[in-house]
Amino acid sequence: MEEKVCPKCHSDQLKKGIIQSGNASVQMFSFTNPRGQSSSMTSLYCSHCGYVLGLYVENPRNVGK
Ligand SMILES: [Zn+2]
């Protein structure tokens, strides 16, 4: 999470969020091993204008194990 300022509105009010579908968190699975471990997805977003700066896999090293 390197970005410090929103590229759209130049606010520094960046927040980390977790991506969910209803009450279930959205998970990243390995394409080659979809029955392996998955990891939740987080995002970095601007709490001023709502722009999403990026998506992150929370534990990328565990995916597909
Ligand atoms: Zn913004």
Image (tube, rainbow, N blue to C red):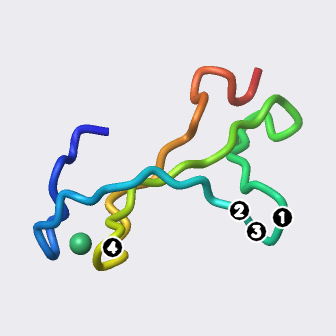
Few, some or many residues within 10 Å of mark 2 (<14, 14–19, 20+): few
Q: Which residue is mark 2?
A: 20
Label 1 CB, ligand 1: below 8 Å? no
Task: Report ligand 1 position as a quadrant.
Answer: bottom left
Q: Position of residue 63 (x, y in %)?
A: 69, 29
Label 2 is placed on what type of residue? Gln
Label 3 is placed on what type of residue? Ser
The correct choice, above or below, for 62 with respect to 42 in the image is: above
Mark 4–mark 2 Cα distance, whole angstroms, equals 17 Å
The foreground one among 38 and 64 is 38
- Determine whether label 3 and label 2 are within 8 Å by CB: yes
Q: At x 61% / y 48%, what residue is drawn?
A: 41
Few, some or many residues within 10 Å of mark 4 (<14, 14–19, 20+): some
Label 4 CB, ligand 1: below 8 Å? yes
Q: Hey, which residue is sitting farthest bottom in the picture?
A: 49
Q: Position of residue 44 (x, y in %)?
A: 40, 54
Secondary element type, mark 3 = strand
Label 1 is placed on what type of residue? Asn
Q: Which residue is mark 3?
A: 21
Q: Is residue 28 left or right of residue 49?
A: right
Q: Quadrant of the N terminus?
A: top left
Q: Is residue 9 left or right of residue 52?
A: left
Q: At x 32% / y 66%, what residue is drawn?
A: 46
- Determine whether label 4 and label 3 are within 8 Å by CB: no
- Determine whether label 1 and label 2 are within 8 Å by CB: yes
Q: Which residue is mark 4?
A: 51
